[in-house]
Image (spheres, grey):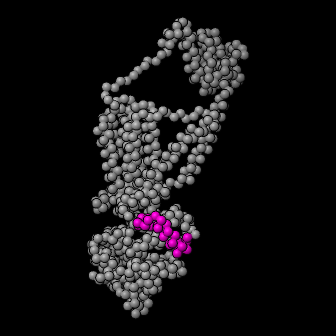
Amino acid sequence: MHAETFLAVTRVRKQYATVLAVDDISFNVRRGEIVALLGPNGAGKTTLLRMLVRITHPDSGSIQWEGTDAPISPLSLGYLPEDRGLYQEMPIRKTLTYFARLRGVAAPQAAQRADEWLERLGLLDRAGEKLGALSKGNQQKVQFAAAVLHGPRMAILDEPFSGLDPVNQEAFLDIVRELRDAGTTVLLSAHQMSLVERVADRVFVMHRGRELLHAATTELMSGGSLHDVYVDRVRAADTAWASAQGVTA
Amino acid sequence: MTRFAQTLEVARWEFNRFVKWRQQFIGLAVMAVFGVVGGMIGQAVKNSDAKPATVAVVNAEQMGFTLPTASGVRWDSTRVWNEVDARTAVERSDLDGALIIASGNEASILVRKRSAWTEPLSATLNMARQNAAIARLVPTPEQRAALFAPLTVTTDFVVEGGAAVAKSTRIAVVAILGLGLLVLFSGFGTMFIGITSEKTQRVTEQIVAMVPPQVWMDGKILGLAGAALAGTMVFAVGFLLLGLLLPPVLGMSSLSIPPMVSDYGTIALILLTTLLGIGMWFAVMAAIAATIDDPNSSTRSILLFLPMLPSGLALMLLPKAETGIAQLFAMFPLTAMSVLPMRLMLTSVPWWEIAVAIVGLVLSVWLFRLVAGRIFSAAILMHGKEPGARELWRWMRAAG
C-alpha cells in the first residue's frame, strides 16, 4: 500500500437481489488528492460511495482507512448524497448549525461556520428563511455547505455539479479545489467531463459494476479530451458486453 | 461527540421542529375565544328558559296537597278550569298545558306536543305528595330528621396501606391518565411525520452518514415524545387557566379546584408508569413508522392507533379491577400504562406487581427502541414495496 494512501478499496462486491451493483472493485485514494468516480447511469458509483459512508455494507472485500480496517469516524467525513433534500420547513442557518453540531462542532463555532459558508455562497441575507423558500440551485448550495462545513478530512461528493447553472458549477469547482488545498481528500462522482478534467488528479471509471478505467487525468487526456476518451471507452465496453451476451446491434 | 450528546442534539432538533410556541399560543387564544363565545351562548340559552310554561290545574281540590312551586312552570290562577275548557285552551295554545287531577293517586298532564317541563313536574308533584303525607303523620323534628337521615357506612382496612384513595387523588390520577393518553394521541401525527418525512424530503441519507441510525431513532423518540408532552401541557395549563378566569367574567361559577392530593406515593407511581408507557408507545410507533415507505398510500398507518386498545381494556376492566385478569394486564407492558393506574386507584396493589410492571415497562422501552433502530437501519434506502413480517425479522437479525 502506498505510504500516502488515505482510502484503500479492495475487491469490494455488492449485490441487490438479482442485480450485481458493484463487482470486484479495487482502487486507492491518496491523501489530499481529488479522485473522480465516473461511469454511465447505473454503473454502481452511488452504491460504492454509500458503502464508503457505511450507509450500506459490502458483501465481500475490504474498505481500509489510513491502513486499518477500523471504520473512519463519520465526523471525519463529509458526504453529499445523490438524493438531494433538506428539511424544507426549517430555517437555513438553523439547519446548517444542526448538521455541524451533529458532526461535533461546538455550538458557537457551528453558527459561525454556517454564516461563513452562507456568505461564501451568497445566501447570508436569507439565513433566517425556510429552506423551502430557496430555488433548487440554492438549496443545492446549502446542501453542499452542510456536507463540508465541519472541515472533514475527506469529502465524498455524489454528483455535486448536477442541476447547477454554469456560474455555480464554476463556483463549486473553486470550492472543491479549496477543500483540496486545505488538506481535504476529495472523491467525487460526476457526469460533467469538462469540469472533471479541470479538477481531478485521477479518474476511476466504472461500467456495469466493474472497473473500466483507472488513470491519472493528464495521462488520459494525452489522447484527447476526457469527454472523448470516456465516451469511446464506454461505447467499446457496451459493444463488448452486448457481444458477450449474444445481442446484435 | 459522544452518542449520548448526538442523541440529545437530535432530540432537541426534533422537539423544535414540531413545537411551535407561537402556534401553541394562537391555539390557546382561539380556545379562549371559543370559550367566551360558548359561555355567552350558554348564558343566552339559560336566560331563554326564563319564560315558564303556563299550566292550568283541573280538579285541584282532589289533589290532597298544596300545589308545589315547579321549575319551568307557572300555575294559571286566572280562573277555575274544567277539563273541556282546559283542553280547548291547550289546543288553541292559550295554555302550554293542563294538569288534570283524577284522584289523590292519579293525575295526567295534557300538552299539545312533547315538552321538556313535564317530567320534572311529575317528579316535583311526587315529592310534594310524599312530603304532604309525611306531614299528615305529624312527626317531631327529630322523627322527621331520622326519616331523611342517610345511613353512614365506613370501610375499615385490616391490611396496612389498604386505605381507599382520596377523592382528590382520584381526580389527579384521572387527570394524569387522561393527559398521558392525550400525549399519545397528539403524538401520533408528529411521530408519523417525523419519521417518514425525511424519506419523502430525502434527508435520510445525509443524516445517517453523520449519526448511527440507532442514535437518530433514540433522538427522535425522545424529541417527539417531548414535543407531544409539551403541547399537551400547554393545552392542559391553558384549559385550567381559562376554566378559572373566564367564568367570573361571564358571570358563571368558576372551575372548582380539588384539595391538595395526599397520596404522593400513588401519584408518583402513576406518573412514572405513564411516562414509561409514553416512552414505550412512542418507541412502538417509531418502529411501525420506520417500515412505512410512502405515508400517503401505506395501510400500516392504522397500526398507529394500537395504543387505543389498552385504554379500552382498562375501561372494560374498570368494574373488575380486583380480578386476576386485571392484575395480569397491570403487569403486561403493553397494557400496564392504563391498567396499573386503574388498579392503584381502585384497589390495594401488592408491591411485587408494581415492581414487575415498572421493570417490564423499562425493558419494553429498551427493546422497542432497539427494534425501531434496527428496522430503520435496514429500511433507510427502502423504496417501493413495504417489507413483510418475514423480511422485517430478517432485517432485525441482520442488524444484530
Q: Is residue B178 left or right of residue B364?
A: right
The quarter of the picture where residue A13 lies is bottom left
Closer to the camera in the image, B235 or B9: B9
State the image quarter where residue B211 is shown: bottom left
Q: Position of residue B257 (x, y in %)?
A: 51, 34
Point out the stretch of residues depicted in magenta.
Answer: A100-124
- Residue B75 in sight from this viewpoint: yes
Q: Residue at x 37, y 59 (%)?
A: B4
From the top left corner, tell me how far across and down residue A111 is, in percent.
49, 66
Residue A198's place in the image compared with A100, above or below, is: below
Q: Main secondary structure of the magenta part?
A: helix
Residue at 66% in and 28% down: B50
- Percent x, y of residue B335: 36, 43
Quick check: B371 above or below B160? below
Q: Is residue A186 visible?
A: no
> Which residue occupies the foreground of this view, B2 or B223?
B2
Is residue A118 in the magenta section? yes
**Relative to B21, does residue A182 appear above or below in the rendering?**
below
What residue do we see at 46% from left, 18% from top?
B150
Residue B258 inside the magenta-drawn segment:
no
Q: Position of residue A109 (x, y in %)?
A: 47, 67
Residue found at x 60% / y 27%:
B116
- Rendering quarter of residue B56: top right
